Image: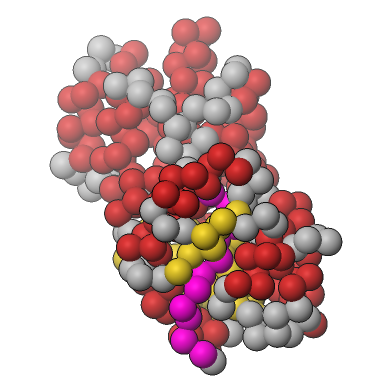
Amino acid sequence: MEDVKVVGFLGLGNMGTPMAGNLLKAGFSVVVWNRTKSKAKPLLEKGAIGADHPRQVAEKSDVVITMVADASAVREVLLGPDGVAASNRRGLRVLEMSTISPADSIGIAQELSRRGMAMLDCPVSGSVKAAADASLTLIVGGDPSVLESVKPVLQAMAKNVFHMGPNGAGCYMKLVNNVVLAAMLAGFSEALVLGKKGGLPPQKMLDVILQGSARSPLLEFKGKAIVDANFAPTFALRLMKKDLTLALATANEVKAPMPLTSFVNELHQAAIAAGLGDRDFSAIAQVFDGLAKAG
């Protein structure tokens, strides 16, 4: 496969914008598109090339990255009338970095393959800060030879790249990862309420946890946010709810029991009903605080 010189980027949200910026810093020519055109302006000012629709991005690029909201948005930008597939760029490599179900990812990859294009599912793990610092973890499913050919692109945005298996495997692992994150914060939030009921200072509780066997990078980052009641979004709670729902649907397909995830999913639904959907997913702590006050 030819070396990558031009990278297209579809979806310039909180994560996509700094990721595309790091590709520019690494020396790639970057062609960008976003449904809300104004979001492309900061990248255009740094030298990115604008496009009117995803098909035009594909026509100009060696590799196209998609980072959009959900499976319907992925299908639209890749397979829609003005989507990437309409470019008829045989040999184009697509890195699908959104969080969607393994089944959706496999189906889209198969359709692109019929058009002569190769897709990797390549969801990301990490915060907005990690996106800005190019220290994300990328979780890949798909052809290893395609992965090898796009390694320079991935390494411009990430610290770690894990190949998990064939198409769909990256999406499976992303769901596993987010189930763990959601369960950890729910457990921490519940335990914090117990301590507060016993008169323990929240910051001291966190200090003890971070020096003991329960220490984790997640609690170092999100535990402090919970203690300080700082729920400015780096990953919105409604998006975590979406991922938990995907995990449960996937579990149903493969007959994997997930009783704890079912309960954590309901807690996230309660948080959304309480108006917390656009806050950070660490705002799940406020559900436990509310239950404690009601008790």
Q: Is residue 111 above or below residue 9?
A: below
The image position of residue 125, as x and y in percent, is 44, 56
Farthest top residue?
294
Residue 121 falls in which quadrant of the image? bottom right
Q: Is residue 161 visible?
A: no
User: What residue do we see at 45% from left, 69% from top?
Assistant: 29
The image position of residue 175, as x and y in percent, is 57, 56
The image position of residue 56, as x and y in percent, is 68, 65
Left or right: where 197 falls relative to 273: left
Magenta segment boundaries in residue numbering: 2-12
Which of the colour schemes (rainbow, by chain, secondary structure, one colour) is used? secondary structure
Q: Is residue 110 above or below residue 283?
A: below
Residue 291 or residue 160, whichever sits in front: 160
Question: Quadrant location of the N terminus?
Answer: bottom right
User: What residue do we see at 22% from left, 17% from top?
Assistant: 201
Q: Is residue 285 above or below residue 261?
A: above
Residue 206 falls in which quadrant of the image? top left
- Picture mark count: 0
User: What residue do we see at 76% from left, 56% from top?
Assistant: 76
User: What residue do we see at 65% from left, 70% from top?
Assistant: 58
The image position of residue 65, as x and y in percent, is 56, 65
Left or right: where 284 falls relative to 60: left
Query: Can residue 149 be found in the magenta stretch?
Result: no
Left or right: where 27 falls relative to 71: left
Q: Is residue 90 visible?
A: yes
Residue 217 or residue 10, whichever sits in front: 10
Residue 91 or residue 169, whichever sits in front: 91
Query: Can residue 6 be found in the magenta stretch?
Result: yes
Q: Is residue 279 above or below residue 245?
A: above
Left or right: where 131 falls relative to 14: left
